[in-house]
Amino acid sequence: MSAKWYTGNAVDDGDKNRGWLLGHFIQPIEDIRSTSDLEVKWGIHPAGQQRPEWTADDRRTTLLLLISGRFRLDLTVDSVTLARQGDYVMWGPGIDHSWQAEDNSTVVTIRWPSLS
């Protein structure tokens, strides 16, 4: 690994940070994946897994992209089910969320900026 480039595997690297591949929380700070600009997560969720609690007062913009499976996202403004590969939903600051994997699902989440 170099401070200026990196190659890896999303599943292996994600195990170290709850699925997150990029963000302010990546250590050491010299790692090219450590950034306050955005966060990227590779999420593998078995059918039935859910986040029963809701986020609160999020100050970031988020994009959730379905790679495979069926994934429901509950937003304070609506509920969306991603069912077709490539389906995505995007929401901004002030909208809270919760989610549930209706089938075994793989999703990519991108949030910006990366905040503590």
Image (cartoon, rainbow, N blue to C red):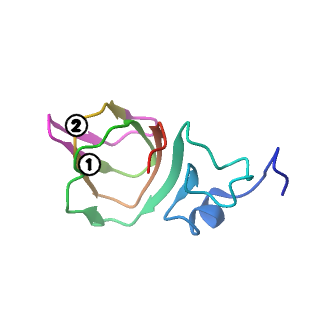
Q: What residue is shown with label 2?
A: 95
Residue appearing at x 23%, y 35% in the figure: 94
- The quarter of the displayed image where residue 66 is located: top left
Q: Secondary structure at mark 1?
A: strand
Q: Secondary structure at mark 2?
A: loop
In the image, is 94 to the left or to the right of 42? left
> Whole-Å distance between the Cαs marked 1 and 2?
16 Å
**Total of numbered circles in the picture?**
2
Tell me the amino acid under the disc marked 1: Arg
Residue appearing at x 81%, y 50% in the figure: 3
Q: Are marks 1 and 2 in contact (CB under 8 Å)?
A: no
Residue appearing at x 53%, y 39% in the figure: 38
Label at residue 72: 1
In the image, is 52 to the left or to the right of 106? left
Q: Position of residue 21 (x, y in %)?
A: 59, 53
- First in sequence: mark 1 vs mark 2: 1
Residue segment shown in magenta: 72-88
The one nearer the camera, 32 or 86, is: 32
- The quarter of the displayed image where residue 1 is located: bottom right
- The quarter of the displayed image where residue 61 is located: top left
Tell me the amino acid under the disc marked 2: Ile
The one nearer the camera, 33 or 68, is: 33
Instruction: Identify whether 61 is placed above or below 17.
Output: above
In the image, is 14 to the left or to the right of 106? right
The one nearer the camera, 20 or 48, is: 20
In the image, is 7 to the left or to the right of 18? right
